[in-house]
Amino acid sequence: MSNTMKRLAILGSTGSIGQQTLDIVRTFPNKFRVIGLAGGENSGLLAKQVSEFQPQLVYSALKLDLPGKAEFSSMEEIASHPDVDLVVIATTGKTGLTPALAAIRASKKIALANKEILVMAGRIITAEAKQHRAQILPIDSEHSAIWQCLRGEKGEVARLILTASGGPFYRYSPSQLAKVTAEEALQHPTWKMGRKVTIDSATLMNKGLEAIEAHWLFSIPFSKIEIVIHPQSIIHSLVEFMDGSLKAQLSFPDMHLPIQYALSYPRRLPNSELPRLDLVRVKALNFEPVTYHNFPCLRLALEAAKRGGTYPAVLCAADEIATHLFLAGQTSFPGIAEIVAKTIDLHRGIANPTLDEILAADTWGRETAANIATKESLC
Amino acid sequence: MSNTMKRLAILGSTGSIGQQTLDIVRTFPNKFRVIGLAGGENSGLLAKQVSEFQPQLVYSALKLDLPGKAEFSSMEEIASHPDVDLVVIATTGKTGLTPALAAIRASKKIALANKEILVMAGRIITAEAKQHRAQILPIDSEHSAIWQCLRGEKGEVARLILTASGGPFYRYSPSQLAKVTAEEALQHPTWKMGRKVTIDSATLMNKGLEAIEAHWLFSIPFSKIEIVIHPQSIIHSLVEFMDGSLKAQLSFPDMHLPIQYALSYPRRLPNSELPRLDLVRVKALNFEPVTYHNFPCLRLALEAAKRGGTYPAVLCAADEIATHLFLAGQTSFPGIAEIVAKTIDLHRGIANPTLDEILAADTWGRETAANIATKESLC
């Protein structure tokens, strides 16, 4: 194994980001080696990944026959194993929270795709990362863009400008939004992503979660984080500096690029498999203001962010339940925001919560959201 | 004087860039102090600048009464004076060449707006700068953009993409171009600049000179420098990295910003007098391919760049004469390119020329271009 080989643990390897991370490993077999894999419900795919990448350590949510020398471990053990340099956290919801903390406490580099971890427990995660000198490298395209724009700068930031495609329904009227089906919501105009984040993109909840993630990743107050609609998803985000100069990061919308950047950082690797951007073919990059009234999830997220404490955890929990119900055809598209709003209304927040209090708020949020949905469907 | 005060010499202080440099000094009286000023034919303005900024050293092309303790010096003396930290070279044409070399040999920082210096003598200037550890900081908005995008990067560059507004005549037909007047050509759609560079922007000669400047400033081969038409002049240029990621620098088009960046680098200073960019108000950023056939000056510049040696110096010299003749109503707009093309055709280039050979080529280019113009007007 060469000195420059990075040894990876990939938590959530069977999801969209996990699979694309393994694409990058396939492209650069001399740069990256997989030490650990953790998969969820798609155990068939996990078994294939294990036999292809031959990790030492495997976590599987479901029963799995392990080939060769691989051993079963917990996600926390994989994330903190001495042979691992960088932990890709591509789990969803709160699943990655305690493994992320384990990796941080073992001073690992973390490539973070699971934004709920920072949304729920940003204060704890960033404080622990500082204490243990664990670097958190963003994978989300917007945060990767900001991170790239901040590279080499002295932090003299005036504003972060998160771009949002607006999702498939940006120009829909309220009556059109009421009729949106799960199938329609899963057709994102510019990005190919997992199901949960695709629905969050359609409600713009995702952009709200990203604002919270940006707040913690870059230590920027919410008053300096703006959102602008940019339908083409070519400019992934911008930073305005104190002198009025802005920097933007651009690419063809493909998650392989920010994943590769987090893996290879501080180097950049030539990858002929990634699509190139041709501005002349793109022709125009457009910008529009965000209209909050049709997308209450975005407003709910920004309000929860400002209230802080356990509110963002409850927001995430309620959104996960509500999105799940929408995908199962058990609530309408506007119903997602209604369930989240009612859950938050019932919550009595705790300021500066401990990890246990955050996890309790998560459980309370899930139960409350589910109860609200059941009552509504009985009415 | 505080330790953080930068002591400036400004060569070409009465020109457009020189005046805007002094605006920045006015805004930050505790950050910058003017040690030397050098002015050309506008001695009235120079006298005012001298009494306002009270420099120790003054160069004037015309007779001038010096107030207070200021002393007359040559531009070379000012540029290399021990009390000077940073030399702003905002002269035009070849005027700044020997002062720039004097500053470099005295290991000064140079903020360079006079692009002809690198076009004519890029190999000598960059070699001397390396030898004497003199930093060359670009002021041109395109090069400032590239420099900002490269900040903190490890030089893993795939392409530089220079943006060009296209100037006032980008959609003109050849018959329309033939009738263009100097007054029309001086109305640039997005930038307020000096007369010579405004005409160079209308012919696109300026973009060719910028490609040569970028080649020398960033050690990038011409094959990796592209030009794209971007009518709004909001994205000032872009860098594509090896991994396919692009970074762009954006701002409202105002030269104060790149000037200030070069003066304050590596810091950025908050300046409420600079206009802020609002992407929502901008609405769209457009891109088009360059059409070379209507803008032969751009093609001539890129050809001269590839031939190298004394050709770029002859290009600059002939362009200066031809532009001057156009401004004086003595040749047509297409006549500029014709005079430059004929001059270059007659030139017998020298590879790896010395400074004297470059200056001789410049003199030859001016005389030849003037002769060609005279003969044409006699025909």
Image (cartoon, coloured by chain):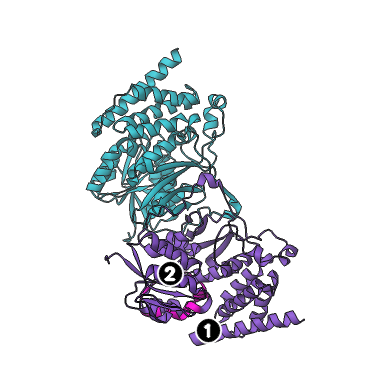
Chain colours: A purple, B cyan
Q: Quadrant of residue B345?
A: top left
* Residue toward you, B168 or B248: B248
* Residue toward you, A97 or A378: A378
Q: Is residue A44 left or right of residue A186?
A: left
Three-letter code for the amino acid on which mark 2 is drawn: Gln
Image coordinates for residue B332, horizontal then vertical, percent: 50, 23
Q: Is residue B127 left or right of residue A185?
A: left
Answer above or below: position of B38 versus B297: below
Farthest right residue?
A: A379
Please state which of the two labelled residues, at mark 1 or mark 2, is closer to the viewer.
2
Q: Secondary structure at mark 2?
A: helix
Q: Secondary structure at mark 1?
A: helix
- Judging by the rendered image, the residue that carries numbered circle 1 is A358
**Res B126 label:** none
Image coordinates for residue A201, horizontal then vertical, percent: 59, 65
Three-letter code for the amino acid on which mark 1 is drawn: Ile
- Write down the region rendered in magenta: A95-123
Image coordinates for residue B138, horizontal then vertical, percent: 37, 47
Residue drawn at point x = 37 percent, y = 41 percent: B223
Q: Is residue A109 magenta?
A: yes
Q: How would you rate the neighbour count of disc 1 (Cα within 10 Å): few for under 14, some for 14-19, many for 20 or more? A: many
